[in-house]
Amino acid sequence: MEVGSLHFHCRPIPWSPELRRRTKPTLPRFLFFFRASSSSSNSGADYKGPKPRRDWVADLVSNNDDAVRSLPIYVGGASLLAVLLNRTVSGIAPVADASSSQSRADLLALGLAVTNILTGLVWLSIRPKPISVVSPEGVECQRIYSHLPDSVSSELLWVWESLSDVTCCRTLIVVYDSHCILQIGFAAKSSNGDGEPVAVDSVKLMQGSLYQNVIKSGAQSYLANLSLYPGKSELPFLPSNTQAVILQPLGEKGVAIIGGDTIRGFTTSDQAWITLIGEKLDATIAKNLKNLTLSAQE
Amino acid sequence: MSNLLCSNPLIQFKMKIIPAQFPAKKSTMKPASISSRLQNSQTPSNQQLNLSVLRFTLGIPGLDESYLPRWIGYGFASLLILNHFVGSDSATTTPAQLRTEAIGLSLAAFSVLIPYLGKFLKGASATDQATIPEGTEQIFVMSQNILDTKKEDLAWATYVLLRNTNTIAVLISVQGALCARGYWNIPEEASRKNLLEWFERQIERIGLKNLKDTLYFPQNSDSVLWELLPKGTRSLLVQPVLQVPKPGANQMEGIEGFVLLASSMGYAYSDRDKAWIGALANKFGGKSL
């Protein structure tokens, strides 16, 4: 559910609503020094600022999206009929000339009605298409390379938490320095029937074209509809029905593979955030593993 | 103050305010506790948005077509009024004409309202750019008595927030460390050295440190109360940083601090932006200094 603004719980502070609407820029100083009597463990006083008003127009429009989109058409159409009806009822001949001031007023009203109808049509035509989520087929797994320092593993877990909470990401794999240091989320079930998630073959991945292209260009690669790409075969560890994949290079030595459950599920803002998170992750890993060589054990 | 309007509403421009370089890496390794599974504060919607590709445009650069109904509304309303007073004598105005003019004026009022309603529809993208208010200066201050890793985290977080959202000023206060970046109105008496104390005093006055819930003011109504914010602020978002309770420990959720974002655009933060900002705030929660 979309919420335009968020609530702030009431505090026992006598803050009268009229004061908020005053246009004077300064308020008497004493108003800022009310101390709440609630027991807070921190030494500072409780929050004394204004609380946000509930934006009912935004909520109304967001919740009744379809109805609002066709509203201008109804308003314009009804006004059109009203103008014509007015003209016939008043006994004036329906001639569209600008000679009398009545006709001019009618023409202006008609012009406005047509504008409204066109706006309604535009809104209906740009209605976003809802795309459904495809649940990934596979098993959940959480594999972290065991010799990572705490700061790196906590950073990796934070990245996973953020991505899975905010975006449609359902799988996250981080490969760095020829080792898979993180595989978390859904993974394809391995074919030998033991129900274990497929492990990431880093060496094979790094020889594949997807990885090479991403490292060479240094830019993020967004495969919005994975089923259309032949490079899908290079990612056998992802669930077979993964819909979208982002490959984010981590410097020159690693890549983060982010699998989502919706076609074109990652917005441009998500992509921008993932790019910057990738840079931070690269910096953290590089800094902490400079003195530590990754051993060949898995 | 220039206000650039994008002619293609489908591309969202973000203003790159500070092309800061990533701070120099230092080799300190301090073990930090691994954050436990965080509570999902926002249920993901089951449907993702896919904007359709075609949109009618006049092709004039700098002209925003979604505001066309508003201009038509104003223009035709003024023409209607002109017609009423100039077109004929007031004595000969018929009731029919008055009815038509009433219909016309109410239609014009509705047309003027249309861009405002259109902003809340799904798929509406912000076409304004964030503008820098006059009289502000660009600052970047940070508490000095904290770990280098913490400094890097704060520097990176402020950089990301300024770069990826429509923010002009950001203030992060967490576990006693303070970082302010962006365009702020600094009063004359606060010199560079005691800028941090000035921020601390303002924060104490408002009591932001004890904030438990996210505050979002999408319009300008209340920000005049806060001397802290730059003058052209129109949206304000304050996200508290809550301490993650360790698994197995029986402690209440404490408040670690807050992240404050100010923008010169109204309705600057979409739900997706707020979700990302919440995720960023979680980075600072649950870590010990």
Image (cartoon, rainbow, N blue to C red):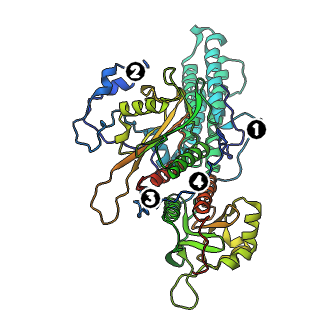
Please say if the residues under marks 3 and 2 sit with CB atoms less than 8 Å apart: no
Amino acid at the residue labelled 3: Thr
The quadrant the C terminus of chain A occupies is bottom right
Q: Are marks 1 and 4 in contact (CB under 8 Å)?
A: no
The answer to whether residue B189 is visible is yes
Label 1 neighbour load within 10 Å: few <14, some 14-19, many 20+: few
Instruction: Pick whichever of labels 3 and 4 is earlier in the sequence.
Output: 4
In the displayed structure, B42 sits above or below A144; it is above
**Toward the viewer: B30 or A47?**
B30
Residue A61 percent across, percent down from the top left: 49, 43
Tell me the amino acid under the disc marked 4.
Answer: Lys
Of the two numbered discs 1 and 2 in the rendering, the one whose residue sits closer to the viewer: 2
* Gap in angstroms between the C-alphas marked 1 and 3: 39 Å
Query: Is residue A66 among what the camera can see?
Result: no
What residue appears at the point 55 percent right and 62 percent down from the top-left corner?
A168
Q: Decide which of B271, B120 is in the foreground and name it.
A: B271
Q: Is residue A113 above or below residue A138?
A: above
Res B9 → quadrant: top right
Residue under pointer 3? B43
The residue singled out by tag 1 in the image is B58
Chain of the residue where label 4 is placed in the rendered structure: B
Name the residue carrying label 4.
B26
Tell which of A77 and A267 is nearer to you: A267
Q: Tell me: residue B242, above or below residue B217.
A: below
Q: Does label 1 or label 4 sit earlier along the sequence?
A: 4
Residue type for callout 2? Arg
The percent coordinates of residue A82 (x first, y second) are 56, 32
Tag 2 residue: A22
Of all chains, the one bearing label 3 is B
Residue at point 49%, 47% (across, down): A62
